[in-house]
Image (cartoon, rainbow, N blue to C red):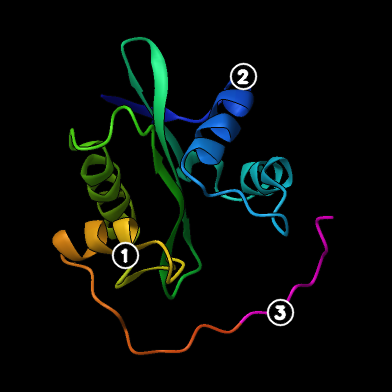
Amino acid sequence: MQLRAFGRDDTETVVALWRACGLVVPWNDPYRDIERKLAEQPELFLVGESGGRVVASVMIGYDGHRGWMNYLAVDPTEQGRGHGRTLVLEAERMLTARGCPKLNLQVRGTNTAALGFYEAIGYAPDHAVSLGKRLIADD
């Protein structure tokens, strides 16, 4: 798999990938999320290509205090080939190069496959409570 920056032409393919991976929920419009990311640190939005098609993605962010990963997705037909690990390692590399001391991510508690994946590559619960407040409705 080859990594590269997301391009606008990737939008439909990436949204379909996210849907196939169960990452799209009614309260987050994936098209708006893409536009928001392209407005902030677009170089930290990566896709992975294999066999001439997009098979993976990750949105990375850094706020000067913590790094974040969102929308890490690997096409279900490509899972188990190390693509997810490749994306995470590249996110870690890019954030470390920016001086980022810690990488955070959120996984829905019901997504046991993702929790197992992250645990296998060294991630562990922070024992912190994640709080949120919707500022702009996407519906």
The residue shown at (62%, 28%) is 11
Marks 1, 2: nearer the viewer: 2
Q: Secondary structure at mark 3?
A: loop
For badge 1, the amino acid type reads Gly
Horizontally, is 58 left or right of 97 in the view?
right
**Neighbours of disc 1 within 10 Å: few (<14), some (14-19), many (20+):** some
Q: Secondary structure at mark 1?
A: loop
Q: Secondary structure at mark 2?
A: helix
- How far is disc 3 from disc 2 in space, using C-alphas? 31 Å
User: Which residue is the site of mark 3?
Assistant: 133
User: Which residue is the site of mark 1?
Assistant: 99
- How far is disc 1 from disc 3 in space, using C-alphas? 28 Å
The residue shown at (83%, 63%) is 137
**Neighbours of disc 2 within 10 Å: few (<14), some (14-19), many (20+):** few
The image shows residue 57 at horizontal and vertical percentages of: 43, 38
Q: Quadrant of the C terminus?
A: bottom right
* Contact between labelled residues 2 and 3, with CB atoms less than 8 Å apart: no
User: Which residue is the site of mark 2?
Assistant: 9
Marks 3, 2: nearer the viewer: 3
Horizontally, is 92 left or right of 28 in the view?
left
The residue segment tinted magenta is: 132-139
The residue shown at (70%, 42%) is 35
